[in-house]
Structure formats: structure tokens, C-alpha cells
Amino acid sequence: MAWRLLAGVLLLQLAASAAGQQQCLSATFQNGRTFLKCNPLPVLGASLHWTHHAENGTADVAFRAPQQSSGWVAWGINTRGTAMGGSSVFIASQDGSGAVSVLMTVLENTSPSLTNGSLSFDVLSPPTADYTNGVYTIFATIALPNNSTTQNTVWQAGPGSTGNVGQHATSGPNVQSMLRLDFSSGQSTGTASNSRLHRRNIHGILNAVSWGILIPMGAMIARYLRVFEAADPAWFYLHITCQLSGYILGVAGWALGLKLGSESKGITYSAHRNIGIAIFCLATLQVFALLLRPDKKNKYRFYWNIYHHSVGYSAIVLAAVNIFKGLDILKPASGWKRSYIAILATLAGVALLLEAITWVIVLRRKKSDKSSSSPYGATNGNGRA
């Protein structure tokens, strides 16, 4: 069951990727410009469109990214490495009158001067930009550095005011916007940052499937199926299967999160990390509680049940909160958050329905037991039992 759910989520991820590629290919530009290739970039909602001219080692490029009119976007190439520092970039922004302009500059360090000047590669014609429907597009024709088709590309977006370029965010997608791209084949290979982004996505999927779906399903099975006599003892094994599968996947996702955190020097999501640790501790206590579960007739079973339910429901609530915190950090396409909300709503709806059904069954059963325990018992039409 766990692997089917995980496979389903991965298929959704592939479908979303395919949809992004289709949207990229169907993009249109002003003045009838067209480009032979395009890639939806992994963060900031950006995409890169280009036509590579192998005969002279140049490329016509269009970079698109959504942004507020007061903000700015940038795209460029780093000939020195894979980081943002040292990159030669085009920055598009608007002035107070709404006119869009492009600044060409080299990012010397993390606090660049943003002086307009030449780049580390040739720009064959003055770059231009436009702003339409909340999206900036930068157009440029460049000579690929060292006549190589594979380049370290970077992109960015941030706030601003009346033409001033403000500081962009220093966490989340804004520190993941780097990609090594082959302008000839269109293939991209992960830099260290993009490899980390891929692992962050896996971390999110593992935790959403485990703590966010499997564990709540296991709790629902234990609460509602046990009421049906025909489901005994199948409900118990289904409950254990869901919980152990969720725990195993959840621990894998939690461990990957700790690894990612140790690699992100200077970037700490304290609340997300601390809640994750708390969830792991509560879930581990639940696993060990199985080894100490008293027999049904034991006088301590009542207290064990209180402990088991309290810890379990606490972990489920914390997991839902932390998944939303993770989504806010990762900032995937909006469809992922809506999908998880739909899953939670579905689980809640099913739980409410089963709650009503099982209460009816329990009350009828108590009424029946009370009737059968009467000193007169059940009687036939002649008043005999």
C-alpha cells in the first residue's frame, strides 16, 4: 500500500513536469519571435527559451519569470563556477514611468555594485525586455563562452521600487536557481544546488506520504474498522501495516531532512526542524509502545490506550502542520499544496462519515446487549423466551 501511494505521488510529479514542459513549448512572444527549444526552470516559476546557432556558437535567448511590476528578474551565465557570485547577468526592471530596461552587470560578490557594463561573454545586440501580464521577458543574443554548448546558467528574482534593484530572499528557491544547461541538446544536469533541490523534493514526498497519508489512514482503520465484527482481526494487521510503512518512510524522509539541514550552512528552518524531530520522537514512542502493550484484560490497558491515542493523534496533527510549513519552504507549484489540502479534506470527510456510522452501530449494539441482559430476555408472542 505504501509503495502504491508513493508511486502515485511520483506519477503526479511526472505529470506536473510534463504539464510544465507543454506550457513552456506553447509560450508566445511579442513581435512574433519564436525559439526552437525551451526548458521550464525548477524554481521561481521561470522558463528559458532559446535557439542555438551551431555554425557560429551563438544563441538567441528569452528568459521569462513572473514578478510584480515593481520587482526585477535576472538571467545569466557563470563562466567561473556554479554559484551566483561571478555570474554575468541581464537584469530587467521598470522605472517610475513603467518603462522596462535591461542592466548588464557582473556579480562580483554577494553584494555587487550592479554597475552597467560588459559581460564575460559577447552580447551581439543590445538586450531588450518587456513586461506583460505579470511576467518579465528578457531577450538577448549571446556568444556562448569558450564556444561551448554546456554552460552554468543562473537566474533570480527580487523586490524593488522605481527602478531600484532590492535584495532578493536568501533562502528557499532563491538559493536554488542554478542549472548546468546544454544549449545544443536541451539537456540539463544538476549542479550541487539542483541535486539538493531534487533531494528536498524527495524529502517532501516521503514525509507527505508517510506522516501525512499513511499514518492518518492507519489511525482511521484502528478507530473505525474494529467496530465491525467481520473485520476482526484484519483491521489490526491493516493498522500495523499502515503505521509501520508510514514510520519507515517517515524516518527515511526525516533522516534526509537532517542531512539537507547539515548541508545548508547559515540557512535554518528552526520551526520545521523542531516539529520534525518531535514527530519522529512521538512516532518512535508509538513503535516501542507495541512491545509494552498489555493484554485486554490487564488493569493497565486503559491507561495504555490513553497514552497510545494521545501520542498518535498528537503526531498526526503536528505532521499536518509541518507538511504545510515544508510546502511554504519548498514553494512548489501551487497544485501540490492544493492536492494535499484535497487529500486532507477527503480523509476528514471519510472520517466524519465513518464516525457517524460507527456511533450508530455502537449505540444499537449497546441497546441490543442491554435488552438481551434483561431478566425477562427476549420473548415470543406467547411471552416465552
Image (tube, grey):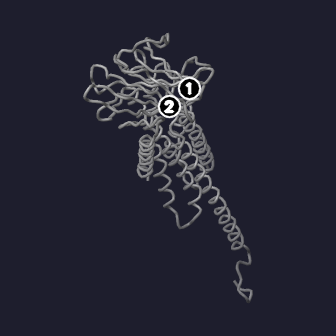
Which kind of residue does numbered mark 2 sit on?
Ala
Q: Which residue is mark 1?
A: 270
Which kind of residue does numbered mark 1 sit on?
Ser
Q: Is residue 385 above or below residue 6?
A: below
Q: Say which quarter of the image contains residue 350.
A: bottom right
Q: Residue furthest front?
A: 31
Label 2 packing within 10 angstroms: few (<14), some (14-19), many (20+): many
Q: Is residue 275 above or below residue 312?
A: above
At horizontal 62% and vertical 60% (from top left) the residue drawn is 354
Give the structural element (helix, strand or loop) at label 1: helix
Closer to the camera in the image, 257 or 20: 20
Closer to the camera in the image, 62 or 340: 62
Residue 72 visible, this orientation: yes
- Mark sitting on residue 148: none
Q: Residue furthest bottom?
A: 382
At horizontal 61% and vertical 52% (from top left) the residue drawn is 348
Residue 262 visible, this orientation: no
Q: Say which quarter of the image contains residue 155.
A: top left
Q: Which residue is mark 2?
A: 65
